[in-house]
Amino acid sequence: MTRRPSSGPLPAGASTSTAPLPRSLDPLQEESLNGYVLRLSHRLGVSPDHILRRTGLADLQKNTQAMAKAARSTVLPAAMAAKFAAATRLTLAETTALTLAGWAPYYPPINRVVEVLRQEKRPPQLDGLFATTARYCPVCLAGDGSSIQDSHGGAWQRAWRLPVFFACLRHQRFLEHLCPTCHRPVGGSSYGHLISLPTIPGLHPAQCRQRRLGTDRRPLTRDGLCQARLDYVDTLSPDRPGTELLALQEKIAAMLAPQRSAVLSGQYFTELQLVTALVLVTWPRARPEAPNAATNAADQYIAEHHMPEARHQSNAPPIDARACAAFLHAADTILTAKDLRTALIPLAPVENRTRTGITPTRHHSWDDAFKNQRHACSERFVRAAENLVPTYRRGPNGHRIASSQVGYEPEHVPAFIPQEWADRHLRGFTGASERFLRRTAAAFLVRRARGGTLAEAVQYLGIRASAQGGVGFGTVIGRWSRSQDNLHAFELAVDAIADELVHAACIDYQHRRRTLADWALPPAAWSHMVDQLPIYPGNRAIADDRKRLAVTAYIWAHVTQGEHVRFPCPPHIVSDPTAREDWRKQRNFVWRWLHRTDEHPYYRQLKPLLDAYAAQLNRAVDTARSSRQLARSLAN
């Protein structure tokens, strides 16, 4: 249906100097702005340049030709929209519907362009959008059989500017991006402009506007263009999307529906864009086993565009709809996995865990995107990805920045991972002692919450860095990790322990460590315990003061959740090597007997007394409100 001249009132905000065109057209459903301009110019028998000038889409003060930018099809400034509506006799709602602005709340790349254009500070970066219409459905361009579409073609749809649209649901076929005659991208010659070569009239909206092959100079007439019809319908196309791809396309389309939650849709599209980029740079790690047209196209795309020797590869999805569909489907499969972190493991760069080589440039670009867009992701995605996939965020000094949303503070981390947690999450590792793994896991947890280096984390936990066996640091833990079948197994174990920590009682172990740094079991308390033990021949030796200092290490380890071997040496024997060595032997001897199944009868009866005292000490340290109260509690 064409619109007749009208002398009715102009839309609000329109300039009275904007003269209406002699004739206009009703927009087609889901039609894009550039498609509408092409159809209208064909209807009026003029060049697209003429329409761009008359409707105010081109800034003639800056351009000698009406080279309207492609960003105009994303959002139109209010004044420009009013002029366009007045010239074409459309309502402002109809004009806005030709752009992508209505999807801005649901699709973050559109919203970013809208915000930049609103501020008018710099040209927008069309990250996550094609600069202009890059894909098309030949059947849609052929029209629906009505007289108006038979004459001027069907709609160039606005959704074809979104990389996430790879199939036409109405006709259940892949979108195309190449001209069937010149085999070049249909939007490849627009150079970011709304219409390619807009000064050339006489072309049908469904004709290719690429330069004729062999033409070097800018064509001035249609004879210098390809002119092939894009609405050729190949009814025998064998590579139609499978059921899973069509279901994915329906899901994506539904995410843009007005009734959907803008927050949830925004999170989904942000995460889909991020994971698709990661799938692309790590292909074929996420490639499905069963080959099809989409995966074969993805393989070919990677072979042509992501050679190993290439230094700067793009993380943007390909224009080819089949290859893009394969990457999107792999990404969506990962995002919908029950265990997202496990699903992301194959895509994580090995360099993050082993420190060998240099992280590929493509992973660095992914890291930048993740860091810039993490605020727009769901908490589930951030927690799954931030300690696995990206290289760690670093501050000006080059040290790691604390991870966000870990769910705990560094003071809540025990210096020695509790035995029950180790049994559940560290028991299956080989080639390293359990003590080493428990100690190192604690350091990893502190570094996540506190940032900095492993050495700083170890110092925070009160572990001597020079102790035999170390704590792993980069060298030892990296070498050990490379010997495992799964390079990420230890990080996953730390994740599981972190979950245990988050759901456990909130205890300030750092406060306990500081409070008990120079503490020892009071002699009176020790005598009281000894008096409760039965008298057997020879058991008087257990009252020895060396035993008091030895059981102090047991109580300290119980309260601080640290290693008994890390208990500080009593100050009065530090300078006496003989006494210090004797104390160390007594400490280890008592510890072993207190943990043996065939306990010595004296230690079997002593252990409950020590445990009860440790429980009282826990309460005293955690609840004391003054240093005087605490000192009195420790003395008693």
Image (cartoon, rainbow, N blue to C red):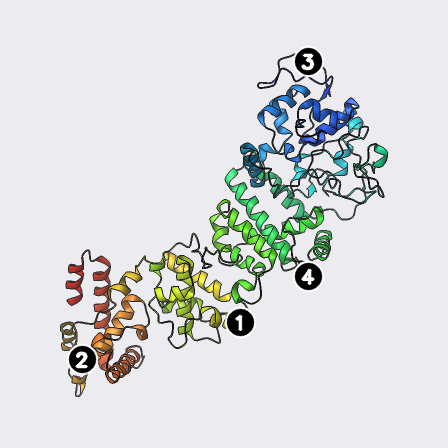
- Relative to 362, say whether 548 is above or below: below
Image position, residue 530 (x, y; %): 16, 77
Q: CA distance from mark 4 to mark 1?
A: 29 Å
- Badges 3 and 1: C-beta atoms under 8 Å apart? no
Kind of residue indicated by mark 1? Gln
Quarter holding the N terminus is: top right
Residue 336 appears in the rendering: no
Nearer the camera: disc 4 or disc 2: 4
Earlier-in-chain disc, 3 versus 1: 3
Kind of residue indicated by mark 4? Glu
Q: Badge 1 local density, few (<14 within 10 Å), some, or many (20+)? A: some
Of helix, strand and loop, which one carries label 3? loop
Using residue 230 as the reference point, say whether residue 101 is left or right of it: left
Earlier-in-chain disc, 2 versus 3: 3
Instruction: State the residue position of label 3.
Output: 6
Image position, residue 100 (x, y; %): 61, 34
Q: CA distance from mark 1 to mark 2?
A: 46 Å
Q: Place residue 102 in its image quadrant.
A: top right
Q: CA distance from mark 4 to mark 2?
A: 70 Å
What mark, if any, has residue 636 been given in the picture? none
Earlier-in-chain disc, 1 versus 2: 1
Instruction: State the residue position of label 2.
Output: 545
Kind of residue indicated by mark 3? Ser
Residue 36 appears in the rendering: yes
What mark, if any, has residue 309 been given in the picture? 4
- In front of the other: 382 or 343: 382
